[in-house]
Amino acid sequence: MSDSQTPVAQKPSPAPQAGAPGVGAPAGAAPAPANGSKGPPKRVLIVVGLIAVAALGAGGRMWYRSHNFVDTENAYVSGHVHPVSARIPGVVTKVLFDDNQMVQAGQVLAELDPADQGVKVEQIKAQITSVQQQIVQGDAAIEQARAQASAAGAQVVQAQANLVRARQDAERFGQLYNTQMKAVSKAEVDAATAARAGATADVTARRDNASAAKAQIAAATSARDVLKAQVQVLQAQLKDAQQQFGYNRIVAPVAGRIGKRSVEVGARIQPGQQLAAIVQDDVWITANFKETQLPGLTPGQAVKIEVDALPDHELVGRVDSFAPASGNQFALLPADNATGNFTKIVQRVPVKITFRPEDLQKYSGRLVPGMSTVVEIDLRQDKPRQAQPARTAAGTTTTTTTTTTTAATTAAAAR
């Protein structure tokens, strides 16, 4: 065999790429990027810009409202709620009202069984009649005692006359019987002396009888006065019983709308037991503002009111007054901050806001106590009118109203 070999065809090697290591570039150099350098997409920039504008707008709006407006959602409609209760115990015989009914002041709402109070009235009247008859008897006893006293006085006069005669007889007999002359007997002298002593004792007895008769007059008069005082007591009791009898008719204390009815015919009620409640139409708003919101508030400022029950109606009210203390002070158990772990909490101060009379009339029956509201006050409005005392020419003090506005202040400064 020959040593010759068959030649093998070889494929040409691919040309090296530009920038490949070892070919046209020093070893260790970083490869160049395939594409040229580009920034973020335009759409991303637009979104970021819109977000930034929205954030600036929201921040600006928050700053603007925080400096020019104060508002709170912690506000509720308040009103006068009058309980209707009985003053005396009894059984209900009539109920003359229904739920949510309008009633007027003095209107009869319910009636109780008047039998018990009627019997008591008749009993006291009978006692008064009995005592009045006793007074008549006392008057008769006084007249009798006066007659006896008069007779006793006459007897005293008669006894005094007998005493005078007995003294005279004793003196005469004493002159006729002595050591020189004995014109009368000793027995006659002794009889005259005894008669004088008897007349003296009789005068004393008659005087005592007259004093006793006068004392009897005083006793009879005092007894009659006691009976008259007893009549006055019974008359007062009769008046009270008649009032109790009148309390069988339960009337409305004020005009308003009935609510919370809890009485039916046949029920036995006790004094003070609430039978219903009357809510007046004169309502207002109690808004609990933070104490940090109070510096810009002044009585008389206009208030924008949104009532949840009237979503499509925007009402306008007025700041009436501020509570004398924060809500925490009126709580049943006020917080005691005299501890070592004190944490300051922003307090809420109730502010009374009144509705306009035309709004109260327009939405009568729809604005009721307990409704939730949202109130907002614009701090840029002019200061409301304030009452200031002024002295008249006559020297009396009267109250005048002045309006302090920016224009008035400028005009006053110019003058």
Image (tube, rainbow, N blue to C red):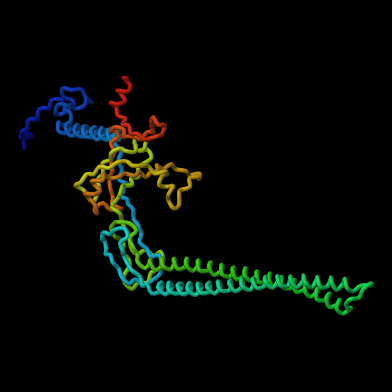
Q: Position of residue 287 (x, y in %)?
A: 33, 45
Relative to residue 234, is residue 357 drawn left or right? left
On screen, 282 above or below 411? below
**Residue 269: quadrant of the picture:** bottom left
Residue projecting furthest to the top: 414
On screen, 221 above or below 70? below
Quadrant of the image for the C terminus? Answer: top left
Residues 241 and 189: in front is 189
Residue found 40% across the figure and 73% down from its top: 118
Q: Is residue 270 visible?
A: no
Residue found 61% across the figure and 73% down from its top: 147
For the image, the number of numbered tags is: 0
Relative to residue 75, is residue 326 drawn left or right? right
Quadrant of the image for the N terminus? Answer: top left
On screen, 142 above or below 377? below
Residues 148 and 130: in front is 148
**Residue 117: quadrant of the picture:** bottom left
Q: Position of residue 402 (x, y in %)?
A: 32, 32
Residues 65 and 251: in front is 251
Residue found 43% across the figure and 73% down from its top: 120
Q: Position of residue 161 (x, y in %)?
A: 74, 71
Q: Position of residue 305 (x, y in %)?
A: 26, 44
Relative to residue 331, is residue 213 drawn left or right? right
Relative to residue 342, is residue 33 drawn left or right? left
